[in-house]
Amino acid sequence: MKPSDFLSKDDKTLITNAIKSAELNTSGEIRVHIENRCKTDVLDRASYLFEKLAMHKTEKRNGVLFYLAVNDKKFAILGDAGINEVTADDFWENIKENMLSHFKEEEFAKGLEKGIEMAGEQLKDHFPYQSDDINELSDEISFGNE
């Protein structure tokens, strides 16, 4: 199965809408990337994609990547330096645990939606929406290794 077929059309809409909704309240940027395989350490792969997707180029270094390797059952959440400087040490772990509870029930879209909402709430506190804010990164889900 192609990674782009992992989620239904409705699931993709749910996730994209969650990103748009979260970004209405923050200058932070959120992306989701899904692929089949992760042959290296999951955080190393997420870091590589973070750079490849130019997420490190946001003005305030406040990008978040939700990465899933569906066949290998791996996922990671990676926040840029600006976020990690201002959030609690267990911030990403709390989101990851919440998402994992949904993933165990095979509710992948719901897990992503909840993780995006949780990240958005924190980003809103630390990086509030500015009236001159521009959407620096696409809200669409990206897919790898078809």
Image: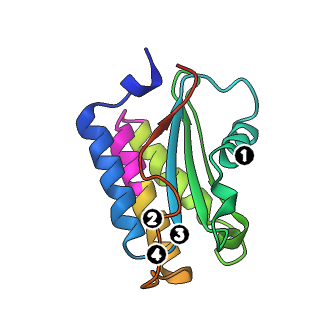
* Position of residue 94 in the picture relative to residue 84 (left or right): left
Whole-Å distance between the Cαs marked 2 and 1? 21 Å
Q: Which residue is mark 1?
A: 47
Question: Image height check: is 121 above or below 20?
Answer: below
Choose mark 3 or mark 2, whichever is in front. 3
Distance from the alpha carbon under mark 1 to that under mark 3: 18 Å
Q: Secondary structure at mark 4?
A: loop
Q: Earlier in the sequence, mark 3 or mark 2?
A: 3
Query: Circle 1 sits in a helix, a strand or a loop, which is it?
Result: helix
Label disc, if present, on residue 103 of the rendered structure: none
Q: What is the span of residues highlighted in magenta in the rendered image? A: 104-114
Q: Pointer 3: what residue? A: 28
Q: Which mark is residue 26?
A: 4
Q: Which residue is mark 2?
A: 118
Dot 3 amino acid type: Gly
Question: On the rendered structure, is 23 left or right of 43?
Answer: left
State the separation of the CA atoms marked 4 and 2.
12 Å
Quarter of the image where the N terminus is located: top left
Q: Is 110 one of the magenta-colored residues? A: yes
Circle 2 SS class? helix
Position of 128 compared to 37: left or right? left
Q: Amino acid at mark 1?
A: Ser
First in sequence, mark 1 or 3: give its number: 3
Disc 3 and disc 2: Cα gap in Å?
Answer: 13 Å
